Image (cartoon, rainbow, N blue to C red):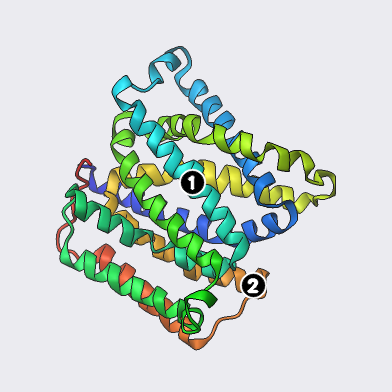
Amino acid sequence: MASPSTQKWALAAGCALMVTWGVNFAITKVVLAELGVWPFLFVRFLAMPLAGFALLVAITRRHFPGTWPRRGDLARFAAAGLIGHTAHVSLVMWGIDLSTAFSSSLVLTSSPLWTLLILALLGTEKLHRRQLAGTLLAFAGIVVFLSDKFVRGLAQAGAGDLVLLLAASLFSLYTVVSKPLVERYGPLNVMCYTLLFGAPPLVLATLPAFLDAPLAAVPAGVWFGVFWAVAVSSFLGWIVWAWVNSVRGLARSAPLQYLMPPIAGVVAWLTLGETFTGLKLAGAAAALAGIAWAQFGARTPTPPDAA
């Protein structure tokens, strides 16, 4: 089990990552509106493997051949890559493009509930009752956030939100599948070799759209947004998230994702002009209360058991 000091650093890193991901929703909306979903996916999945393996080679140098996964782990790497990168990320981009920045962040924060459900079914982590209660309270806040949409019926809820709900479940499945790999190989190795399996299908599928895109007309500010979304939010973000999960355990780190909606909401209000009712603010308060209960309500921390 990690030392108390490492646990604190992991919590701080997780909170900082939630700020980064919260800001990224508004940035991604602008990028997708200017560049398009498929050209952006091509850039993302071409750049991330190249950057990842460049960093891995720079760190390991002569020992780089030893980073190749063991034969018994190849199937898990392939599954994690196809679930976490090919399926999850493409659905997230599609959903964000169809929905709003604020709603996107809200729906994607349902992934901790999926994580807890998967963990409960597999029996891989012991869940404290207060953690479960806090997570449910936070999710209830999210339901209040979206109530103005769903009160009009499922058909009016928005295709983007439903796509993002599926993406959230896939992210939880990726987190559970990849955790044993992170413990054995480290976050950077896992990101690189899951991308090795997950990136090629999307690069091939999105190449025609990238070649047809009017790239010369894309403003410089949008290209900076692409850099932020790919290099900062995705490349560094996935490495940090894997490390946070390996230190704190999935059950204790998953509720951190509830920090994203308030951050995304404030940024969307300031930059995109999105507005929120008092009911949505009440939902935010409930979500934050659930986060606090899930993170700090347990008398003794839950050990990050191996999956």
Residue under the image location 57 percent in, 31 percent down: 51
Q: Residue furthest top?
A: 62
Q: CA distance from mark 2 to mark 1?
A: 31 Å
Q: Amino acid at mark 2?
A: Leu
Residue 163 coordinates in the image, percent (x, y): 50, 60
Residue under the image location 39 percent in, 38 percent down: 80
- Quadrant the C terminus occupies: top left
Specify the quadrant of the image occupied by residue 27: bottom right
**Which circle marks residue 87 in the picture?**
1
Residue 56 coordinates in the image, percent (x, y): 48, 25
Q: Residue furthest front?
A: 155
Q: Amino acid at mark 1?
A: Ala
**Which circle marks residue 270 in the picture?**
2
Please tell me whether mark 1 sits on a helix, a strand or a loop: helix
Please tell me whether mark 2 sits on a helix, a strand or a loop: helix
Q: Residues within 10 Å of mark 1 (few under 14, many from 20)?
A: some
Residue 204 coordinates in the image, percent (x, y): 62, 34
Q: Is 48 above or below relative to 9? A: above
